Image (cartoon, helix red, strand yellow):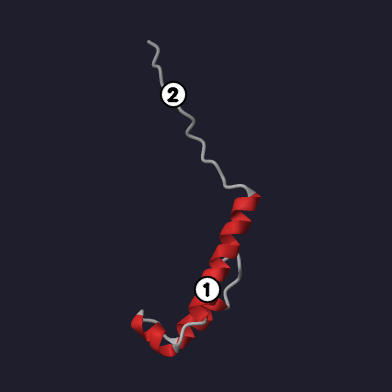
Amino acid sequence: MTYYTDTGFNTAVQRPSIIARIHAALELRKQRKALYSLTDEQLSDVGLSREDATKEYSKSIWA
């Protein structure tokens, strides 16, 4: 007996290109910089402290 298991589509996971990964890392850095630039009052409004913002801002671009 033969079983046909071809799903008809490629199930391999496609990794993003190096350009896409660099773009994502730079976008994340931009967002961290924006978070760091908020005032203490604005950070409090979103439930974060200055220490939280500093920790996030100081993370590596690849983290």
Left or right of residue 50: residue 23:
right
The quadrant of the picture occupied by the C terminus is: bottom right
In which quarter of the view is residue 26 placed? bottom right
In the image as oriented, which residue stretches furthest toward the bottom? 40
Cα–Cα gap, marks 1 and 2? 42 Å
Residue 59, how many percent across, how many down? 57, 74
| Label of residue 32 in the image | 1
In the image as oriented, which residue stretches furthest toward the top? 1
In which quarter of the view is residue 33 placed? bottom right
Instruction: Name the amino acid, label 1.
Output: Arg
| Label of residue 6 in the image | none
Compare residues 63 and 16 and report the one nearer the observer: 16
The residue at which mark 2 appears reads as 8
Q: Residue at x 55, y 77 (%)?
A: 57
- Helix, strand or loop at mark 1: helix
Residue 15, how many percent across, how many down? 57, 45
